[in-house]
């Protein structure tokens, strides 16, 4: 992991950035209601609900009325949707 200190993440390497999010989260699942917290504001629960309804989300798991995502699947999905632009 390329960090200057515990609070800084190297966003020059998107894969490193997303895996750092997963490491900091520390749980195997991310509730849809918490994707904004998990992603640092990159994702919103309503956006995820819309993408799920279109079949474009990372794959959800439902338990009753609660929706969660496997952390690893969410990270892989975020990586596939990320484009790095030249500076």
Image: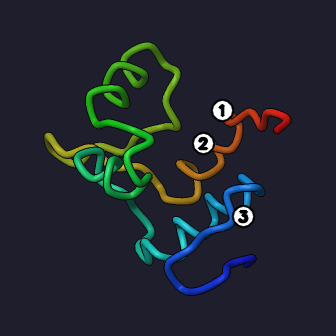
- The residue at 14%/40% (across/down) is 65
Which mark is drawn over residue 6?
Answer: none
Residue linked to disc 1: 81
Q: Nearer the viewer, residue 74 or 6?
A: 6
Is 85 rendered above or below residue 15?
above
Q: What residue is at 49 percent from the left and 37 percent from the top?
A: 59
| Mark 2 surroundings: few (<14), some (14-19) or many (≥20) residues within 10 A | some
Task: Tell me whether the residue at label 2 lies in contact with that at label 1, contact meaning CB atoms closer than 8 angstroms.
Answer: yes
**Mark nearer the viewer, 2 or 3:** 3
Image-quadrant location for residue 30? bottom left
Q: CA distance from mark 3 to mark 1?
A: 15 Å
What x and y, as percent, mark residue 84? 78, 37
> Element under label 2?
helix
The residue under label 3 is: 16
Quadrant of the rendering where the C terminus is positioned: top right
Q: Secondary structure at mark 1?
A: loop
């Amino acid at each position: 992991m390329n960090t200057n200190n515990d609070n800084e993440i190297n966003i020059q390497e998107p894969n490193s950035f997303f895996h750092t999010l997963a490491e900091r989260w520390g749980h195997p699942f991310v509730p849809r209601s918490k994707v904004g917290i998990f992603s640092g504001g990159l994702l919103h629960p309503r956006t995820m609900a819309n993408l799920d309804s279109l079949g474009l989300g990372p794959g959800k798991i439902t338990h009753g009325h609660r929706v969660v995502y496997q952390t690893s699947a969410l990270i892989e999905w975020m990586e596939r949707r990320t484009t790095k632009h030249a500076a």
